[in-house]
Each structure stands twice: as structure tokens, then as C-alpha cells.
Image (tube, grey):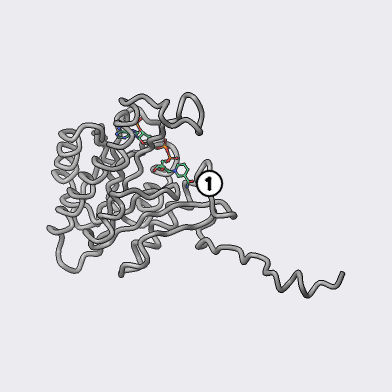
Amino acid sequence: MSSSLSPSTSKPTIFIVGFGRNIGSGVARKFKKEGFNVAVASRTVEQMDVLSDGYLAVKMDVGKVADIERGFEEMEQVYGPAAVVIYNVAHATFAPAGPSNPLSISFQNFYANVALSGVHAFEVARLANAGFDRLPENTPRLFIATGNVLSSMTDRVLITGMNRFYYASEVSPQGGPQNPPDADTHGLVFHRLYQQRVQGHWEVRFVRGGAPWQPRPKPCSLGIILNPA
Ligand SMILES: NC(=O)c1ccc[n+]([C@@H]2O[C@H](COP(=O)([O-])OP(=O)(O)OC[C@H]3O[C@@H](n4cnc5c(N)ncnc54)[C@H](OP(=O)(O)O)[C@@H]3O)[C@@H](O)[C@H]2O)c1
């Protein structure tokens, strides 16, 4: 746990699960600037050079359900229930024999990936929602899963089960995944979603800088017809 905390339960709290150098630190910076208490969790959080003074560091392995529960307890002991919870755990499994052979992934890797992107993400959302229920009635609350365009079954459960849920992905100008995603853009968009006090469409796609992604209109056949030979 970070030692130089000045806990304030009068301020809203953001809890970033899957904190790291990139998106997590960009989102933490933005919400800190906007007056939030910031709590951050990962397996190696205490060793991270992007861990600023004033962040509550919660050591948590989302692959272990008991760790998730203990992590929420630790965060709530200091700040009470969080108003904003971000699920940003990075999990990627690449097929050793290439993308055309997904069954070359070992069962253990596949299982860990499904657990992190689905089952255990559900448990984080469930505990976040239990905290939201203990906030004063008019306190805005928000759960965002950082996305890479590929939403999961869990996201579909959360759309109907949570008061305010977004699956938010930065995309390339063409609408595909954006590698690497931009940290400050995520901070900006996530805070904008917090300020937007009513639930909008659950899937949010945005481009670097924060503008919503707009599909480019496809050239229509009429254009070809109108072009004289
Ligand atoms: N828009 C796009 O196209 C796009 C592209 C790539 C990624 N993404 C999304 O961006 C998010 C992460 O990206 P990022 O750039 O912020 O990565 P990042 O800086 O590496 O942060 C992710 C953090 O997740 C933590 N983590 C991994 N496994 C964990 C576990 N079992 N328990 C707790 N924490 C765990 C890691 O910390 P520890 O190792 O200390 O646990 C890591 O610091 C993911 O949600 C991913 O889907 C989107």
C-alpha cells in the first residue's frame, strides 16, 4: 500500500483494476486531476514506476478470485465503495502455430485467458456493483471495461445487469484495433463518460484524441455510374 496517502471519503474514488504503464496510468492521471481518490491494482503494482504518491496500491491477481475479494476489501477500507471501476487487465494469448491454428494454444493458456476476459471480469464487476449499491443514491457510478473491439459474453451480461456499463475501445481510423492504445485519450474519454450522467450506447469506439469513431462512407456505385468513361 502506498505510504503517502491522504484518504478522503468525501471525494469520489476510481479503482483501476489492471493498472499499468499505459492506459491505467493515463486514466489515473486524469481522474486524479479531476479530484478523485485513486486506487490501483495489479499483481506487481508496488514495483511500478508509474505509481504516483497519493495512489492507493492494491496488490491483486485477478486470476485468483480470493485476491479480487481481498483487493476490493482493502480499497474500501480506505476509501469506501468506488464510484468508478475500470477493468483494464491485459490478457493476450497468441496461438504458437499462428492465427490460422487457434487449437495450438495450450488448455492452460486458453483457460487463463477466458478466466481473465470473462469469468473473473464478471467477479470484478459484481463487486463493483455491490459497492455502487452502497453509495448515496444520487452519486454517479460507472464501470468501464477497456476494450480492443472484441467484446465478450461477460460484457453482454453487464449491459443488462449494471446501472452504467461501457465497453470502450480506441480504434484506428479504419475502425480496427489500435496498437498501442493511447493512455491520455482513454483518460479523456473515460472521464467524459463519467460526466455523462445517463447511460448511452454500451459500446463506445473512439479514435486518438477522443473523438467518437465514425465509419467512413463507402463509395457508392452511383459514383461510378456518374463518372463518364
Ligand atoms: N484499443 C485497442 O485496440 C487495444 C489494443 C491493445 C490493448 N487494448 C486493451 O487495453 C487494455 C490494457 O492495455 P494497456 O496498454 O493499458 O496495458 P498495460 O499498460 O500493460 O496494463 C495492463 C496491466 O494489466 C495487469 N495485469 C495483467 N494480468 C493481471 C492479473 N492477472 N491480475 C491483475 N492485473 C493484471 C498488468 O500488471 P501486472 O503484470 O502487475 O499484473 C498490466 O500492468 C486491455 O484491456 C486491452 O484489451 C486495447
Q: Is residue 178 left or right of residue 91?
A: right
Is label 1's Cβ within 8 Å of ligand 1?
yes
Up the image or down, 220 lies above or below 40; here it is below
Residue 119 in view of the camera = yes
The residue under label 1 is 178
Q: Is residue 24 left or right of residue 125?
A: right
Of 110 and 88, which appears nearest the observer? 110
Give the structural element (helix, strand or loop) at label 1: loop
State which quadrant residue 174 falls in: bottom right
User: At 51% from the left edge and 47% from the top edge, which residue is drawn?
Assistant: 177
Q: Ligand 1 falls in which quarter? A: top left
Q: Residues within 10 Å of mark 1 (few under 14, many from 20)?
A: some
Q: Amino acid at mark 1?
A: Gln
Of 2 and 104, which appears nearest the observer? 104
What percent of the width, then of the height, locates residue 96?
A: 47, 24
What percent of the width, then of the height, locates residue 19?
A: 35, 39
For the N terminus, which image quadrant?
A: top left
User: At 30% from the left edge and 30% from the top edge, which residue is drawn?
Assistant: 46
What percent of the width, then of the height, locates residue 87?
A: 32, 46
What percent of the width, then of the height, locates residue 22?
A: 45, 40
Residue 3 in view of the camera = no
